[in-house]
Amino acid sequence: QVQLVESGGGSVQAGGSLRLSCAVSTSSGYTYNTYCMGWFRQAPGKEREGVAIIDNNSNTGYADSVKGRFTISLDNAKNTVYLQMNKLKPEDTAMYYCAAEPWCTVVAGTLRETYNYWGQGTQVTVSS
């Protein structure tokens, strides 16, 4: 069983930055960089969409809307996945979720149905 806990959300003005964290743990013990990790977001009234993904080989992928502004990264020592968000826009406002799956490709990792493990979410609000 995989447990994911997000943090780092908050309110920021347009153009600002936030860094989201996702602490990963399991009941069985594992080397978490063997997992495929994704960040998703869901705004009110909209579908949950993939934002960034890092696969088992540390290949990364991003939604077109965040390319050049968001960066996904791993800290093996802390068992934590990060999403650095720069140049934030009001349209980035959403609940952000971390997701994990033992294996996936970058393409599959952009899809919500790929993942079986989800965090509880952290709210990001960007004001104009």
Image (tube, rainbow, N blue to C red):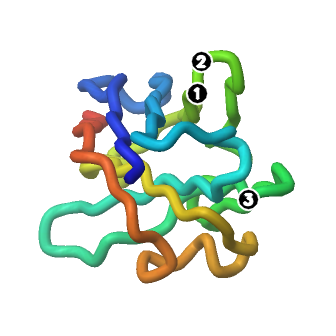
Classed neighbour count for the residue bearing mark 1: other residues with Cα under 10 Å, few (<14), some (14–19), many (≥20) = some
* Element marked by disc 2: helix
* Element marked by disc 1: loop
Tell me, yes or no, if residue 71 can be seen here.
Answer: no
Classed neighbour count for the residue bearing mark 2: other residues with Cα under 10 Å, few (<14), some (14–19), many (≥20) = few
Q: Position of residue 54 (x, y in %)?
A: 70, 53
Classed neighbour count for the residue bearing mark 3: other residues with Cα under 10 Å, few (<14), some (14–19), many (≥20) = many
Q: Nearer the viewer, mark 2 or mark 3?
A: 2
Q: Label 3: which residue?
A: 55
Q: Amino acid at mark 1?
A: Asn
Dot 1 and dot 2 residues touching (CB under 8 Å): yes
Q: Earlier in the sequence, mark 3 or mark 1?
A: 3
Quadrant in the picture for residue 80: top right
The residue lying toward the viewer, choosing from 37 and 20, is 37
Q: Earlier in the sequence, mark 2 or mark 3?
A: 3
Vertical arrangement, residue 29 with respect to residue 80, above or below: below
Horizontally, residue 113 falls left or right of residue 79, namely left
The residue sitting at 35% across, 43% down in the picture is 3
User: Label 2, label 3: how many angstroms apart (C-alpha)?
Assistant: 18 Å
Tell me, yes or no, if residue 9 can be seen here.
Answer: yes
Horizontally, residue 5 falls left or right of residue 74, namely left
The residue lying toward the viewer, choosing from 24 and 93, is 24
The residue sitting at 23% across, 39% down in the picture is 123
Q: Amino acid at mark 3?
A: Asp
User: Label 1, label 2: how many angstroms apart (C-alpha)?
Assistant: 4 Å
The residue sitting at 45% across, 24% down in the picture is 18
Dot 2 and dot 3 residues touching (CB under 8 Å): no
Q: Label 1: which residue?
A: 79
Question: How many labels, in total?
Answer: 3
Q: Label 2: which residue?
A: 78
